[in-house]
Amino acid sequence: MRISRFLAAGSLAVAAAAGTTRLTAQTSAVRVEIAFARSARSEPVTGMVYLAISRDNRATPIQQTDPEGVPLFSKYVEQLAPDTAVAFDSGYRGHPVATLAGIPAGEYWVQPFVNVYTRFPRSDGHTVWMHRDQWEGQDWKKSPGNLYGEPVKIRIDPSSTTPITLVADKVIPPITPPADTAMVKRIKIQSQILTKWWGQPIFLGATILLPKDYDAHPEVHYPVNYIQGHFSLRAPGGFGSGGEFDKLWLAPDTPRFIYVTLQHPSPFYDDSYAVNSENNGPYGDAIMQELLPAVETRFRVIRQPWARMLSGGSTGGWIAAAHQIFYPDFYGGSFASCPDSVDFNYHQIVNIYKDANAYYVDNGWMKVDRPTERRPDGNVVSMMKDENRFELTVGDKSRSGGQWDIWEATYSPVGKDGYPMRLWDKETGVIDHAVAEKWKKYDLLETLKTNWAALGPKVGHKLNVYVGDMDSYYLNNAVENLNAFWTKNGNPGEMGEIVFQRRAPHCWGPRAPELLEKMAKQIDKYAPAGADKTSWRYR
């Protein structure tokens, strides 16, 4: 699910605006011109030029932008030359304020930013322009090579005809990965499969946490937990911080596993969702044929299905469940917490197959907006339309690097222009049911129902799901449908567990001590006769 929680504070309170109302154009002469300095970049830019406006500078205006944050305006440019101004007076998009005319007179902090795109001549015949990950995890706000200017305090006067000029004259520096330690190792490889498909170098990586005394037991091979989730270069479990996980990992009675987090950012998001996709490309193939073999060749993994576990939460929860279902013979158990929608009859709270509109329910005399996030007591945090329109401001054609856009990039067919076909109109919320039908191949419950005779015996005892019944993003609803199918079609005593926690938000699930115990029990129960279940349990 989401990479980070959105900042509620710092939202710009605009005259006569209430809640998440999106303001529309008014008469105004406000004009802002943004250029990037030749000293920062000598080559032309194709990409997005942004203008962020805030009432304060407690964090930079750019950092304060999000669906419920300060106003962000954007304009797509092609081959924009250095020192050439882009005018924010027409042909641009804004959120939550639609145009500069919606900004009342006053003093503000403003900041320019340029998100640089790369040309990808893909092997499917389409050429697209996307932001290329620089091993930052597809985060345009901190991506090396992107350009920005320092925040400037100005006065906006709607009656003034004098342009406000801003310059992006600084470059975000390269990422410096953390250094390896005795127990934490990192690998990064260029994927030949993805590089060929995208027409540009694409990299995959893994961060490996070794068990205690790994080097002292060179004859021992270990079970592995492939932890799915968002891009991160930190050690699995946060090892090395001196916290409770460190104590658990180094304790004498802890089962010895190799823990692995995977890095597979795509041009659309901080992770690829780890499956083959018309828009993302063959990430499933690349992970299974290149990345996991690289891990298991270099480190002493027990290279048998019964010893390979999957875990993850949110986005990682969906991947953990999906990989167990799509590669049933490769893994021996999946422990998925708060997974993204496992049934698209509840894509959060939208039924993509039947609902007419994603943003609201039309009751005839009134339309009721759909929320996208809530607190455990039911109070609504944000609405569907606002999160989607913010993404549209950050980048059109599913290029925002945001949550809804990566779902389209993963599940939708590729359009004639080479970009994902929209599941719904990003402005209006009207759903395209022909596209929705194409999503069914990634609908995990639909996949199980359709292929249960073959899949049931392979995954029924391996798949475990955990979710709060007040999940912040309503993800519990899809799990309820999975649970109903599980209960009706499974063999009692031989099925994985589906557990709901009362009033728990996103992302509830078993924490490290309980999870390790569950994985060890899974191995004990299902490892074949003669398998080594003891040597890796040393004290």
Image (cartoon, rainbow, N blue to C red):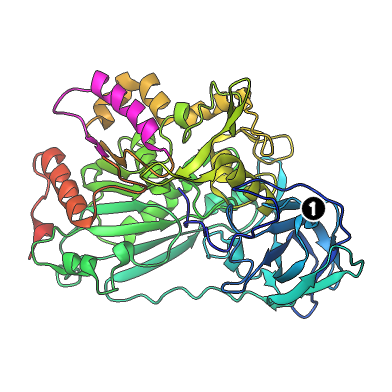
Answer whether residue 225 is visible to the viewer in this image.
Answer: yes
* Residue at point 61%, 47% (across, down): 20
Does the magenta-highlighted stretch encompass residue 491? yes
Q: Is residue 279 above or below residue 130?
A: above
Quarter of the figure with the C terminus: bottom left
Image x and y of residue 394, in percent = 66, 54
Q: Which residues are magenta?
A: 474-501
Instruction: Indicate the position of residue 42 as horizontal and vertical percent values.
Output: 79, 74
Identify residue type, mark 1.
Answer: Tyr
Residue 284 visible, this orientation: no
Q: Is residue 205 left or right of residue 383?
A: left
Residue 429 at what x, y percent from top left?
A: 64, 33
Classify mark 1: helix, strand or loop: loop
Q: Is residue 36 left or right of residue 337?
A: right
What residue is rendered at 72% in x and 76% in y? 153
Residue extending farthest bottom = 39
Up-down: is 525 above or below 249? above
* Residue on which the image places disc 1: 92
